[in-house]
Each structure stands twice: as C-alpha cells, then as structure tokens.
Image: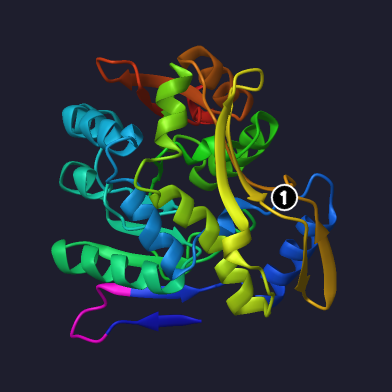
Amino acid sequence: MSLQSNGSRPALQLTDLHPTPADLAAEVLAGLQRRPRAIPPKFFYDARGSQLFDAITRTPEYYPTRTEIAILQTRAAEIAACVGAGSVLVEPGSGSCMKVRLLLEGLKPCAYVPMDISRDHLRVAAEQVAAEFPWLEVHAACTDFTRRMEVPDSAPEGPRVAFFPGSSIGNFDPDGAVDFLAVVAALVGPGGFLLIGVDLKKDPAVLNAAYDDAAGVTAAFNLNLLARINAELGADFDLGAWRHRAFYNAQLGRIEMHLLSTADQRVHCGGICFDFAMGETIHTENSYKYSIAEFQSIASCSGFTPEAAWTDTGNLFSVHLLRVPDASAD
C-alpha cells in the first residue's frame, strides 16, 4: 500500500509494510521460550520507544550521537565529493531523520528513502524532511529492514547510496553484520556506496555510562519493551518487578542490555505461562564495538571496499565510506 501526503506535489509517499501483531507475537514468544531468553532489539521501537531513544541521544553520557554529528558536519563536503550528486539515498532505521539533514544539501540526491519499523514516528519524520527540503522527493517505507529491505517502486531510478548511522551495525553479531552488509551491498549494487557509523572500542567506564545514564532514560527505554508487549500482546509483565541492566562484555567486545527479574514471578503472554527466577534476565540488545581495522575486515567480507574512515579527535566514534566495486571497471 502506498499513501501520498496531501498537497499539490507528491513530496512524500509512504509504503506501509509494517510488521503485524502476529510477527511481534511470534518473535517474542520464541524469544521467551529459548534459553537464555532474548527479544530482538528492533521491538524497542514503537512510538514511545522511538521517543525515548531520541531522549537517550540527548543525555550527557551518550556520546555516539553528538560525536557522529560532529564528524558528519566536518566531513560533509568531502563525503559529497566522493559520492556525487543525483543518487537515491536510502536510510534503513531512519528514526527521526536527524543526521541525514547534514548531508542532503551537499549530496543533492534525487530521492530520499527513509525506512523504519515505527510507522507513526516514520510518517512524522518523513513529512518534516519533505517540508524542509521541498526540492527532494521522499519515499518512506515502513518496514522491518532486518527482514525486508527494498526500495519502494515509487522511487526513481538512479545510483544508490545507503546511510546507516548511529552504530546500529553493532546490534548484529559479527557474522550477522557480514550478512546484513551483504544485503546492503546488493541493494546499492555495483558502484553504490554505504556511509555508516561505527562505535569504537574504548574505556569500559565510558561505555557503561552511555548505556546506563544517571537520569534513567535508557532504563525507561528498555522497560518500555515490556510495556509494549503488555499493550499489544495482552501480557501481564509487572514493570515494577524488572530492572534495567547494561554492561560492557570485554571478552566479546560488546555492550549487553538485559531486563533483570527482581523476584520469582510468573508472566502470562500469548496463552503461555513463563516462570522467571529472581536474577534471571531477558537479553534485549547487544552493541558491538570495533576498531577501524576490525570493521573494515567485516566490510570487505560483505562485498564492500573501504574508501575512507573518519574519526573524532578523541577516537570515540568512526564514520566509514564503503563502495561496492564496479564490475565494469575490472
């Protein structure tokens, strides 16, 4: 289904491939039945979860957003010179579409394709981009991009550039990252580009603080997953009996986020009873951290050639430009 905004020009089109409640139920129930229990982080992002994530990016402890923005602002002209104008710019997991605004004037794409799993959040963000950049065609796609990543039929033809900021690649394990990047490489095709944010390895104290801020915004974000399951699947999680837990696992090079049961309890969801012991957790997210060389190795295994890598002066974060080799150039 394609929805067009009101007005005299087709500034925004929304293709709705939103996951159904059955998709949510199937993955949540499967995750709660496995050991250790785990729920995919993509389900954080209902309307409330998306709002909370935006709030996380404004906390003083959460360095990735402001650091990546500074890199993009500093390197925007250089990125535009490398990529060129007239592309179809695709952003999986676009969220509030905040960072892409730093690139649009320089890149001058012929179309922008934001993709997000949260329909309402996507619609608002895409409408704002269309209003701010009246020369730009916006073809939004509400989709679970981890399962289906396609440029809508309404979008024009043209060379493709994917934009994947925010270190979201860290939510995949290394093998999963290779597989996901291979899908992106196929999407952009020979000669296409990927501009991607990757969080760097650093002092664990900095990492732990970033994922467990003093104001408790990340805790609220994590617990909202249970609130969503209650609301959409009729579960009876007692949010007061769960606590946010986040820590850096140095051996695996990743932040782990969990929901910790603070008591022995029974939860009903989808007609199934789940017993949790005090101290048992539901694993809700990983965020892998990489060195420049480690990430470039992953990119190379996915069909990309590293073109450039930029970091901040504190070596907290990196932005990489990757390209799929053009077969005609061989």
Q: Is residue 134 above or below residue 55?
A: below
Say what secondary structure mark 1 lies in.
Answer: loop
**239, 110: nearer the viewer:** 239
Q: How many marks?
A: 1
* Magenta stretch, residue numbers: 6-12
Residue 251 is left or right of residue 216, and the answer is: right
Determine if residue 157 is in view: no
Q: Amino acid at mark 1?
A: Ala
Can residue 75 be seen in the rendering of this structure?
Answer: yes
In this image, 137 relative to 248: left or right?
left
Residue at which label 1 appears:
38
Q: Nearer the viewer, residue 122 or 162?
A: 122
Q: Residue at x 54, y 35 (%)?
A: 170
Residue 175 screen position, x and y as percent: 69, 31
- Residue 278 in percent (x, y) is at 75, 49
Could you tell me residue 43's position as x and y percent?
A: 58, 60
Tag 1: Cα neighbours inside 10 Å, few (<14), some, or many (≥20)? many
Instruction: Say which residue appears at 26% left-offset and 77% top-offset.
Output: 10
Residue 217 spot, x, y in % from top left:
39, 51
* Vertical position of residue 303 compared to residue 46: above or below: above
User: Residue drawn at (31%, 20%), measured in percent from left and top?
Assistant: 310
Report whether 15 appears left or right of 84: right
- Coloration mode: rainbow
Q: Main secondary structure of the magenta part?
A: loop
Quadrant for residue 3, please give it: bottom left
